[in-house]
Image (cartoon, helix red, strand yellow):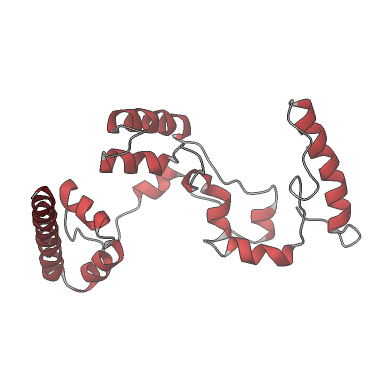
């Protein structure tokens, strides 16, 4: 919220606290406490919060936030499909729910320019998707590798996404070797688990 200098945070909090309390009571909820109901701070506090990822992400990526309950973000649903071991979300259920999400959000804009802001910042008119797609591909872009589904699961299992990208940028041959070593590491881990289970049975 942007205000003029004559309006401070205490005035805004007073107005919004009353509105929030009324909304809660009208909805059948208990009256919120002053400490946790509505807290207004000035912009100097925003950097601590926004620095988590960036203001553009904060405004458009609510779908990536992790719930404290048993629900899933859309990308959590895809992870449940990929891993296949979530007790609350079978791959079939997670896939079905993600399809519902994707249909609901397909083609929907999540970030809008305020009226007159683009002109005030001297930014040219935004290009639509059709114009962007019609442009030729960057000549520097090319396919480095295609990673099979099972190999990608190993990359995630060993948390090697960043290493994979670093290696891919410098040496394509090393990338293939890296993926092969991940498979070997997984085989070795599986053998160790089997051996440990046999010892426990004895």
Work out whether 112 lies above or below 94. Answer: below
Residue 129, by quadrant, is top left
Q: Residue furthest front?
A: 202
- Identify the residue shown where x is 82% and y is 44%: 16
Q: Is residue 6 left or right of residue 124?
A: right
Give the quadrant of residue 120: bottom right
Q: Position of residue 2 (x, y in %)?
A: 77, 55
For this orientation, the residue located farthest to the right is 6
* Image vertical order of residue 170 relative to residue 78, above or below: below
Residue 99 visible: yes
Q: On the picture, is 180 further left or further right than 109?
A: left
How many callouts does the rendering have? 0
Q: Does 57 appear above or below 100?
A: below
Left-right relation of 5 to 146: right
Vertical placement of 74 versus 174: above or below?
Answer: above
Name the residue at 77% across, 54% down. 40
Residue at x-position 11% and y-position 69%: 173
What is the x, y in percent for residue 104?
47, 30
Question: What percent of the width, then of the height, locates residue 160?
Answer: 26, 63
In the depicted view, which residue is nearer to us: 200 or 28? 200
Q: Is residue 148 visible?
A: no
Q: Position of residue 90 (x, y in %)?
A: 30, 32
**Residue at image location 55% in from the left, 56% down from the top:** 56
Front one among 52 and 88: 88
């Amino acid at each position: 919220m942007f205000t003029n200098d004559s309006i401070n945070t205490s005035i805004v909090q007073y107005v919004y606290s009353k509105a929030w309390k009324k909304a809660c009571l009208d909805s059948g909820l208990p009256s919120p406490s002053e400490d946790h109901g509505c807290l207004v701070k000035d912009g100097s506090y925003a950097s601590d919060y926004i620095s988590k990822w960036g203001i553009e992400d904060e405004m458009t990526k609510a779908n990536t936030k992790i719930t404290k309950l048993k629900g899933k973000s859309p990308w959590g649903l895809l992870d449940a499909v990929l891993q296949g071991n979530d007790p609350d979300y079978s791959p079939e259920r997670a896939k079905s729910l993600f399809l519902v999400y994707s249909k609901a959000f397909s083609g929907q804009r999540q970030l809008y320019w305020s009226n007159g802001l683009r002109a005030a910042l001297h930014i040219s008119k935004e290009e639509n998707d059709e114009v962007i797609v019609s442009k030729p591909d960057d000549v520097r872009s090319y396919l480095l590798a295609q990673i099979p589904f099972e190999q990608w699961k190993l990359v995630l299992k060993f948390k090697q996404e960043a290493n994979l990208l670093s290696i891919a940028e410098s040496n394509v041959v090393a990338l293939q070797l890296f993926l092969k070593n991940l498979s070997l590491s997984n085989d070795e881990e599986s053998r160790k688990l089997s051996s440990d289970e046999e010892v426990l049975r004895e």
